[in-house]
Amino acid sequence: MTAAERPEGDWSDEGRSDHYNPLANGLGRAAENGDTALVQRLLAGGAEVDAWVPGGRRALDLAVCAGHAEIVRLLLAAGADPRLDAGPYTEATPMLLAAMNGHTEVVRALLDGGAPPGGPAGRLRYVPLVLAVATRERQHSELVDLLLDRGADAEDEMKDCTALDWAARFGYPALVERLLARGAALTERTFREGVAGQSITARRGPFSHDPDYKAVRALLVAAWEARARRSG
């Protein structure tokens, strides 16, 4: 997500200040810091699990972003709602944030807690599978498999592109291969742009790595030719 795409944040306390209290504030800090024992004590002491904390976040939101899967499970077991808005601008959901950051075990915890695997979701209408593919440096094949295993649709689109489109355009051969193996549709557009080595990020951005378009081209050509043989 680029700075230009982020909606303007609302940093006022309107509608939230009534929910600020020492227990909730402590729960938010403990969740973000990964302090499992303190989270347990605060929940046992009556901390409201989905209360706002200063900065307009919730404990689940903070634990997800920090990658603390065990604490995410604790909060969900205490009744935290994984469908609530999350992020510094309340623009996302916990699932979107976990996928965006490549936190596979956090995604697993959210799925086990009832979070939907697909999208679009959040105010920006993003798709967890696409974020798992497109927005981090590492190629998270395990995370892609997890989302697909739990019901994510490989053909869900974000900004008019599927996960396979994004993987090909970014030059991610491991993810292209994985998505093709999992049945992602190879459209003419995906094939044409992937083979041409076209990327939606002409200049390397903060989430990109050195792309391997040669490997992507080889995978797409092989898949296209195999499809042609089957149809012929």
Image: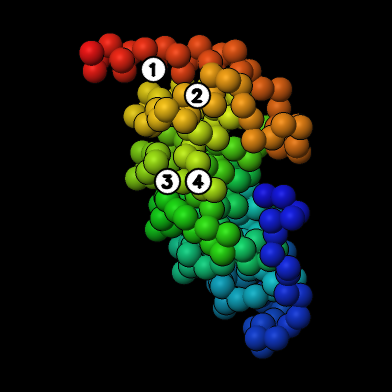
User: 147 left or right of 7?
Assistant: left
Q: Which residue is mark 4?
A: 160
Q: Which mark is residue 224?
A: 1
| In the rendered image, the vertical position of residue 186 relative to residue 161, given as above or below | above
Residue 125 visible in the displayed image: yes
Asked if marks 4 and 3 touch (Cβ < 8 Å), the reply is: no
Kind of residue at badge 3: Asp
Q: Which mark is residue 216?
A: none
First of labels 2, 1 by sequence position: 2
Q: Which residue is mark 2?
A: 192
Instruction: Select label 3 or label 2 by which is in front.
Output: 2
Q: Which mark is residue 156?
A: 3
Q: Quadrant of residue 204?
A: top right
Viewer-proximal residue, 173 or 34?
173
The x, y position of residue 67, in whole percent, is 63, 47
Instruction: Select label 2 or label 1 by which is in front.
Output: 2
User: How many neighbours does mark 2 have within 10 angstroms: few (below 14), some (14-19), or many (20 or more)?
Assistant: some
